[in-house]
């Protein structure tokens, strides 16, 4: 079983910064891309940022220049550094990983989510 455990959410004032981290554990052969999604109250879950195993990144327009995704392949972790946070960034943030295991093929794994609240 593969698990993703997130940490780092919380309450932050507008303009502030927060760093989310996610660690993968369990039995698997490799992790392809990893990413962060978010779901605001009353809205659908949306992709925020992704990073491939060779560190190629992609962001939604609303966070470009403010958020930075990174990963450590040796530790199977992914992080999201969020700066210049806005109230509209308030959401539950979910870590996601595209995992390969010889016995199971390729499958998606999700973290439990961590709440980020941007408010004064």
Image: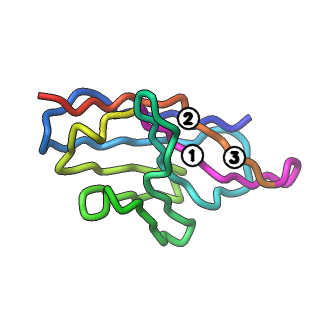
Q: Which mark is residue 35?
A: none
**Residue corresponding to mark 1:** 96
State if disc 3 and disc 2 touch (CB < 8 Å).
no
Residue picked out by circle 3? 108
Residue 111: mark in rendering: 2
**Would you say 64 lies left or right of 6 here?**
left
**The C terminus - image quarter:** top left
Q: Nearer the viewer, residue 68 or 7?
A: 68
Label 1 sits on a secondary structure element that is: strand
- The 10 Å Cα crowd at callout 3, few under 14, some 14 to 19, many 20 or more, is few
Mark toward the start of the polypeptide (2 vs 1)? 1
Q: Residue at x 30, y 41 (%)?
A: 89
- The front one of 58 and 2 is 58
Is the N terminus in the top left, top right, bottom left or bottom right quadrant? top right
- Badge 3 element: strand
Separation of residues labelled 1 and 3 (CA atoms) = 7 Å
Mark 1 touching mark 3, by CB under 8 A? Answer: yes
Of pointers 1 and 3, the one earlier in the residue sequence: 1
């Amino acid at each position: 079983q593969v698990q993703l455990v997130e940490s780092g959410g919380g309450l932050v004032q507008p303009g502030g910064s927060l760093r989310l981290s996610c660690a993968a554990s369990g039995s698997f052969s490799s992790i392809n891309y990893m990413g962060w999604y978010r779901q605001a109250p009353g809205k659908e879950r949306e992709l925020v940022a992704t990073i491939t195993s060779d560190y190629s990144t992609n962001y939604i327009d609303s966070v470009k220049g403010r958020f930075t995704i990174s990963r450590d392949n040796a530790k199977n972790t992914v992080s999201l550094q969020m700066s210049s946070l806005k109230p509209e960034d308030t959401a539950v943030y979910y870590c996601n990983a595209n995992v390969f295991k010889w016995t199971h093929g390729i499958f998606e794994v999700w973290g439990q989510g961590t709440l980020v609240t941007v408010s004064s």
